[in-house]
Image: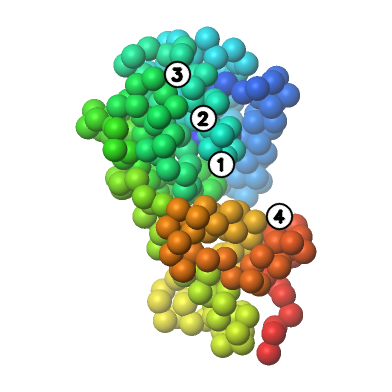
Amino acid sequence: MGAGIVDLCARAGLSVLVLDQSPERLDAGHRAITEFHAAGIARGLTDPALLEQVTQRITGTVDPADLAGADLIVEAVTEDEGVKAEVLGRVATHVSEECVIASNTSGLSVTRLATYVSRPERFGGLHFFNPAQLMRLVEVIRPIQADKATVSTLVAFAERIDRHPVVVKDRPGFLVNHLLIPYLNQAIQEYDDGLATCADLATAVKLGLGYPMGPLQLLDRIGLDTHLHATGVIYEDTADPGFAAPALLRELVAAGRLGRKTGSGISDLEDPR
């Protein structure tokens, strides 16, 4: 996700300084951006000159002290509170008092994350959707500590990189995942119960609800392991039964059927009926 956010910012004409833990990780991020552009060029959707323009706007570093002049920092490390806490705390010591720090997260408590920085009123959350270059929505999460200027800065940033911001308060799942995850869990359970086939579930939601794809196909695109982690985090915080992971989901993840990333998932599972 980090590479996608960097790409978005550079496409919008912003100068981007990327901090990572090693030169190898910086190279991996550069490759991810290059491969994304190459795929677009191959389909005739991307101007070949754009990649050079993007690359020229990106600088990499492994030294947090280089962030001293930044006015906005977007942290996009792995979705683990302990890892984020360490990175945020380290970065916060090197930036100015005016700098806004945001964490890109799909479900962690932004209010808790704000406690790891020295100026929590200048901290907020962003939730980019994958792939960031194609998904237009960005949730701007407002923790309890954030002041209005911080939220306004994050909204303006999202608009500057041609995304559509939606401001939401900090709660488990924010807005989109709070709506989406119970729907996907229910679809898994209905499929496992034999209520409908994968194809019929897809037909029902596409023709009856206007959705672009079926729930099981969407799960395979998201990644079953990613969904299991997300629903587990919210269930741990809320004990809401809608976020309890269905047994079939846990079994598929244990079996290594994670969806598109592994070549097999739930939408190609033999029908239980």
Q: Which mark is residue 261?
A: 4
Single out the mark in the foreground, 4 or 2.
2
Label 2 packing within 10 angstroms: few (<14), some (14-19), many (20+): some
Marks 2 and 1, the one that precedes in the sequence: 1
Q: Which mark is residue 169?
A: none
Q: How far apart are labels 4 and 3 at the CA level?
A: 35 Å
**Quarter of the N terminus within the rendering:** top right
Q: Amino acid at mark 1?
A: Glu
Q: Are marks 4 and 3 in contact (CB under 8 Å)?
A: no
**Quarter of the C terminus within the rendering:** bottom right
Marks 4 and 1, the one that precedes in the sequence: 1
Q: How far apart are labels 2 and 3 at the CA level?
A: 11 Å
Residue 35 located left or right of residue 95:
right
Which residue position is annotated with label 2?
A: 85
- x and y percent of residue 173 in the render? 42, 53
Q: Nearer the viewer, residue 259 or 146?
A: 146
Q: How far apart are labels 3 and 1 at the CA level?
A: 19 Å
Which residue is at the far left?
Answer: 148
